[in-house]
Amino acid sequence: MSLTYTSAPEAIGHWIDNEAQTGGGRSQPVYDPALGKVARRVALATEAEVNAAVASAAAAQPAWAGTAPQKRARVLFKMRDLVERHTDDQGTAPQKRARVLFKMRDLVERHTDD
């Protein structure tokens, strides 16, 4: 399988409060080690974005802490299983990595909303 990157790679932003964030304008390249080429760009967070992410995590923590340990363990083991199942995919197609991450996010949301 051959991957082709455009001259303007897709940007990787942040995920804060269940919303995609584009970042504060600064970014840096992410290299594909197999090709030695820029595969994408990752947004560098501003101080405000870091503060928002920390506040979001702090707000979510009580619900996670209130989730039964057995249920939290099931969520984390399922996440581990998804990562292990798709490890080979991760090295071959960035789109597959994104799908795995979205599946994990949905799994966590399903198990913490109960």
Image (cartoon, rainbow, N blue to C red):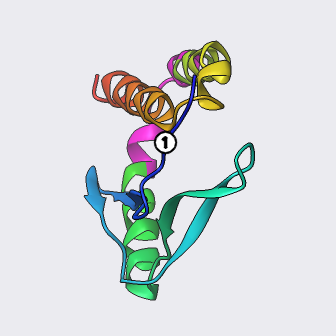
79 w.r.t. 5: above or below? above
Q: Residue at x 37, y 83 (%)?
A: 25
Q: Position of residue 29 (x, y in %)?
A: 58, 68
In magenta stretch: residue 110: no
Q: Within the image, what quadrant is residue 56 found in?
A: bottom left
Q: Compare residues 112 and 19 and report the one nearer the observer.
A: 19
* In this rendering, position of residue 31 left or right of residue 79: right
* In this rendering, position of residue 25 left or right of residue 79: left
Q: Residue at x 42, y 54 (%)?
A: 6
> At label 1, which amino acid type do we have?
Thr
**Label 1 crowd bin: few (<14), some (14–19), many (20+), radius 10 Å:** few
- The residue pinned by badge 1 equals 4
Q: Position of residue 8 (x, y in %)?
A: 39, 64
Q: Compare residues 1 and 70 and report the one nearer the observer.
A: 1
Indicate the quadrant containing the C terminus: top left, top right, bottom left or bottom right: top left
Q: Within the image, what quadrant is residue 30 found in?
A: bottom right
Q: Residue at x 60, y 28 (%)?
A: 92
Q: Position of residue 21 (x, y in %)?
A: 30, 64
Q: Residue at x 34, y 27 (%)?
A: 106
Total numbered badges shown on the rendered structure: 1
45 w.r.t. 97: above or below? below
Magenta span main SS: helix
18 w.r.t. 90: above or below? below
47 w.r.t. 31: above or below? below
* In this rendering, position of residue 101 left or right of residue 70: left
Dot 1: what SS? loop
Q: Position of residue 95 (x, y in %)?
A: 43, 34
The segment highlighted magenta reads 61-74
